[in-house]
Image (cartoon, rainbow, N blue to C red):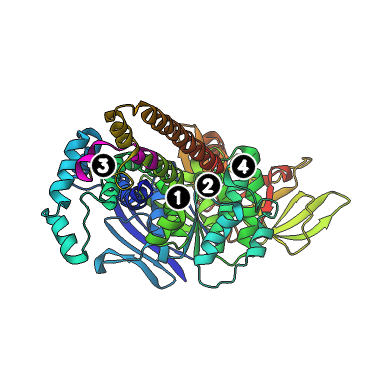
Amino acid sequence: MAARAVGFGLPVALLAAWVLARGRFPGHFLVNALAHLPMVLPPVVTGWLLLLLFGVRGPVGAWLAATFGIRLVFTTAGASLACAVMVFPLMLRAIRQSLEAIDPRLEQAASSLGAGALDRFFSITLPLAAPGLLVGAITGFVASLGEFGAVITFAASIPGQTQTLPLAIYAAMQVPGGEAVAARLSLISIVLALVGLLASEWVGRRLRARVGL
Amino acid sequence: MSLSVAFRQDFSELTLDIGFEVPTAGTTVLFGRSGCGKTTTLKAVAGLLRPAGCRIEIDGTVLADTASGLFVPPEQRRIGIVFQDSRLFPHMTAEANLRYGLRRAPTGTIRFEDVVDLLGLSGLLARRPHTLSGGERQRVAIGRALLSQPRLLAMDEPLSNLDAERKAEVLPYLASLRNTLDLPILYVTHSLDEVFRLADTLVLIDAGHVVEAGPFSALLARADLPIAQHDDAAAVLLARVVRHDPARQLTTLEAGGCELLVPLQDAPPGTRVRARIPAREVILAAEAPHGISLHNILQGTVHGVVENPVRHAALVEVSLGDQGLLARITPDAVARLSLAPGRPVLALIKSMAIEVLPG
């Protein structure tokens, strides 16, 4: 579920980061604000907005159901979507930072060597942004594992399907004598978070060292 | 075959109105102070800048023409650029950098192995840019631009970020480039020394305008151009080696019908060389002196005199056959010898004051 959230969310975050880092257009700040909304809104509100949009009777949800027979609410795919939206600002920030660190004059040099816009993006921009992309993916993945509010609102808490770690911990604490389970799950959660943070730090440092930063 | 450039561009502090037409063959140096518009001109030619109104044409191919709405993007212009700061791709090895343009270029005559040889890159291929010295980086950048099989190589002050030692390391490669490859070069610099060594054609730019454009040695010998007011102003005679006299440790050069004696050179007779003669080292005389260490006494004619009241100096332009010299002397000397256009004069030049540069 978390992998799927990152897999679908990352390309969108990359596109948004590129537009925000390089584009100069009217409404720039509005797009920026919208992209960061899930970070500052209460997660329950984000989940509720997702329900409105992607619910069986929501505009997008109804269309998806009618055309592809896809139902998102209360499904694993729905939980992935909720996670992707929630961790989107995290990934966006990491990618945007690394895109902004790239000297645009390198792309000028590439164009003088015969590389067109798409070619430049894949041969220069993307490899140089790779540290940010990886860091974004790792933090996005770990944060997805810890999603609570938006998932429970949009996809409920179905064990084995849409239940994230904190949802399972919360469920365990509601059951008499579930403290041991909650403690174990919390420990897993702490370890995962730590491993994720360390991994992203390590990967970022390794990749930057390769280009001499 | 020519490069013709015309464009206008307004900046807050300067309006550029550049126009010149020069032969494409050889090296064209754009020379002027920092901020006069040389780099902007190079960018306009390469397509990195799209001026408000412009027309750029090279060997009959129009690259940009505002009037007809034509603008060829930089990736289709086939103009290799060597930037001041080299701009190697940090995530690639030197070799991958070199091959970047080669892979995207049409098949051409400039081969990978030849460029590696010419620029001495064989030991650097596996290294990453951040492990290279400034001079090495610049050599890789030159190779990378060459291998993109450009129709024109544009260099934007490629030596200005290097210290004197690194400059001395890269400069010979630039000179050999000029002589080995039959490739038009557009070279931006504010260093007179690079003009002396590299230029075939000179475009003098000042405050956004072209002051003069033409063959470099003719322009360097003119007293009325701002370039002649430099401390290191010098004329460069196009010469060839005539004979060596090892016993006297002298070499005879021939330039425009005059013979010049210089310290012994190791180039074989017939070799083309440039003889740089600084304006401040030239003495003018009405009659030949005797009993003097001097070797070179050249018969010439005064072509013009320009006084510089601020520096209390006068620049005298002396024609020697089809070439010319500059002499910086005092206004008092001009009066004593009554130097005026048309007057015959002797130019006295120490052999040791002549710098012989590769042709």
Label whose residue precedes the other's in the sequence (1 or 3): 1
* Between marks 1 and 3 in the image, the one whose residue lies nearer the viewer: 3
Left or right of B327? Residue B296 is: right
Under mark 3, the amino acid is: Ser
The three-letter code of the residue at mark 4 reads Thr
Quarter location, residue B4: bottom left
- The magenta segment is A141-155
Residue receiving disc 2: B90
Please tell me which residue is depicted at 38% across the width and 59% down the height of the picture: B47
User: Is disc 3 placed on a helix, strand or loop?
Assistant: loop
Which dot marks residue A106?
1
- Both marks 2 and 3 on one chain: no
| Residue mark closest to the camera, 2 vs 3 | 3
Q: Is residue B344 above or below residue B110?
A: above
- Residue underneath mark 3: A157
Marks 1, 3 in one chain? yes
In the rendered view, would you say B261 is above or below B14? below
Instruction: Write the residue at 84% across / 54% down.
Output: B245
Indicate the amino acid at tag 1: Leu
